[in-house]
Image (cartoon, rainbow, N blue to C red):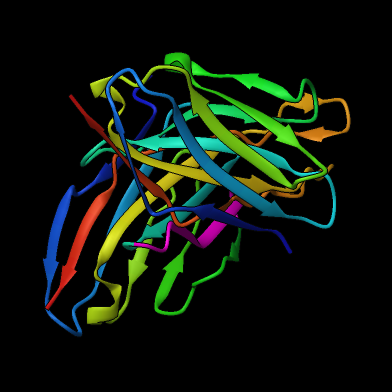
Amino acid sequence: AQSVTQLGSHVSVSEGALVLLRCNYSSSVPPYLFWYVQYPNQGLQLLLKYTSAATLVKGINGFEAEFKKSETSFHLTKPSAHMSDAAEYFCAVSLPTGGTSYGKLTFGQGTILTVHP
Amino acid sequence: NAGVTQTPKFQVLKTGQSMTLQCAQDMNHEYMSWYRQDPGMGLRLIHYSVGAGITDQGEVPNGYNVSRSTTEDFPLRLLSAAPSQTSVYFCASSYSRGTSGGRSYEQYFGPGTRLTVT
């Protein structure tokens, strides 16, 4: 079974500062990893995903994440925060399975990012 | 494409009432799923379907029923609502796209239904 832990339920940064949201996973096989963003009263939008290609993954809105197998981590970063980045962020894991099997998503608890002017 | 649509957006039920949350997608995705979102718990999988006529339980299936008669629709039924089912419900759809060594299962989410059970 797979699991995800997001360290820090709330992260607060100043506009222009580095954003770092932490995600650690547990999986018996090399996983697929995802970061989703949820703006207030909206659904989830995919930011980026790791599917066993390049370990440094670039996503939308200037975000990127690095898969580190030795640390079982997939932390999300952005060099310079913008006010519009304020949202809740979810890390999720699924196991790559072949055939007609369904890759169930297991989500972390979420991290609320606040950006101060 | 409208993507994944959900109705209603908001619903208030009394304990013991039944209702169906509707979900539809127009992307011809074979996989569909229902999640509930509760504060501090992320999203938890309720039920999922890998194609028309095929459904299975997720992490928190108790109190919910599903069926999948068409590729497009995946309704979620609450037979006897309880206050513990107060939550935000998200429907998602996904597809398998062949990549070396597996499938990506990228999921597309609907806007959600906010349900309150009193």
**Is there any visible trace of residue B105 in the rendered image?**
yes
In the rendered view, would you say B15 is above or below A34? below
Q: How many marks?
A: 0
Image quarter (top left, top right, bottom left or bottom right) of the C terminus of chain B: bottom left
Q: Please identify the residue farthest to the right as the structure is shown.
A: B101
Q: Which residues are magenta?
A: B40-53
Q: Position of residue A45 (x, y in %)?
A: 41, 31
Q: Nearer the viewer, residue B20 or B42?
A: B42
When asked about the image quadrant of residue A34, the answer is: top right
Q: Residue A78 vs residue B100: left or right?
A: left
Q: Residue at x 81, y 25 (%)?
A: B99
Q: Residue A98 vs residue B67: left or right?
A: right
Image quarter (top left, top right, bottom left or bottom right) of the N terminus of chain B: top left
Q: Position of residue A24 (x, y in %)?
A: 64, 50
Q: Residue at x 72, y 26 (%)?
A: B97
Q: Residue A88 vs residue A1: left or right?
A: left
Q: Residue at x 48, y 30 (%)?
A: A46
When asked about the image quadrant of residue B84, the answer is: bottom left
In the rendered view, would you say B71 is above or below A77? below
Q: Nearer the viewer, residue A44 or A23?
A: A23
Q: Please identify the residue farthest to the bottom as the structure is shown.
A: B16
Q: Residue at x 71, y 39 (%)?
A: A32
Q: Is residue B51 magenta?
A: yes
Q: Position of residue A17 (x, y in %)?
A: 37, 23
Our reading of the magenta stretch's main secondary structure is: strand
**Is there any visible trace of residue B71 in the rendered image?**
no
Q: Position of residue A95 (x, y in %)?
A: 75, 48
Q: Nearer the viewer, residue A8 or B9?
A: A8
In the rendered view, would you say B12 is above or below A14? below
Q: Is residue A65 magenta?
A: no
